[in-house]
Amino acid sequence: MESWLMVLRQRPILYVAVFSLVFRVIHRLLQYLPRPTAVDRHPWRTWKWKNLSVSLVHSLLTGTWAIACVVQYPVMVHEMYSTFTPLSYLLVIVSSGYFIQDAGDIILSGFVRESWEFLLHHVLVIWCFMYALLTSHYVAGAVVALFVEVNSVFLHTRLLLKLADVASNSSIFVINKLLNVVTYVTFRLGAQFFITWYIIQNYSWLDHALYFLVTMILMNIMILIYFYRLLRADFFSKHSRQNGMHKLVKD
């Protein structure tokens, strides 16, 4: 493994570009799968469905991969600046390729205004991941950051269900929204806050600590705002309460 790790570290930008193309091919292939009728009624829904389908593939792959890397080498959680394995380095390359592809998809879609928050998130992630790949520092931090993709599986599924006009009181929607909020707290908020804490605790000796701390604070603000929106939409809106009572009475 050490030999191919050396190969990857010699030209990380090249391999990121390769995996960016791989995810673009996946994007093309997913277009041949059948879509719900409700999705094809509006251009934005059609594009968003395709975009989220690729995102779901990425989340299923990298979320599982990130956990496997930490299980294989747990010390990465405590030494996020300098420790990593060949598989974790490859993971960051693959994920960087996805984020570049997805940022390009957003820009070329014509729906930048509707997706500017995701584009800003991608720019921050790409910058951090590319720094990790080029310097071999914070690679483990990038792996821990990819724990959020476990939650993204349910987050993307939620949006796909909404695009398909699946009823919010249906069993699949209710189960997914519960798993979504649980994994949001544990894997998304938990991972983000842990990395922020790590940077603060080791601020005095970490390279470019100020940049990474500011980046994490910005991302923390973004995910907290989105979490508030998520709770309000799925649990505290009048529509959600009515659906919840209807589901309770029906069951």
Image (cartoon, grey):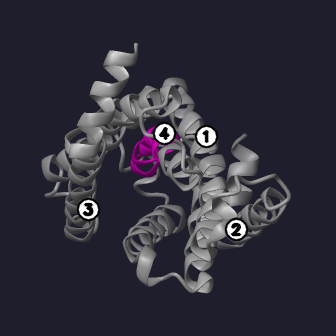
Q: Earlier in the sequence, mark 3 or mark 4?
A: 4
Label placed on residue 60: 1
Looking at the figure, which quarter contains the C terminus? top left
**Separation of residues labelled 2 and 3 (CA atoms):** 25 Å
Q: Earlier in the sequence, mark 3 or mark 1?
A: 1
Label 1 or label 2, whichever lies nearer to me, is: 1
Q: Secondary structure at mark 4?
A: helix
Residue, disc 3: 222
Is residue 234 within the magenta segment? no
Image position of 152 with respect to 37: above or below: above
Looking at the figure, which quarter contains the N terminus? top right
Q: In the rendered structure, which segment of residues is drawn in magenta?
A: 141-155
Q: Earlier in the sequence, mark 4 or mark 1?
A: 1
- Residue 94 seen anywhere in this rendered image of the structure: no
Label 4 or label 1, whichever lies nearer to me, is: 4
Q: Amino acid at mark 4?
A: Phe
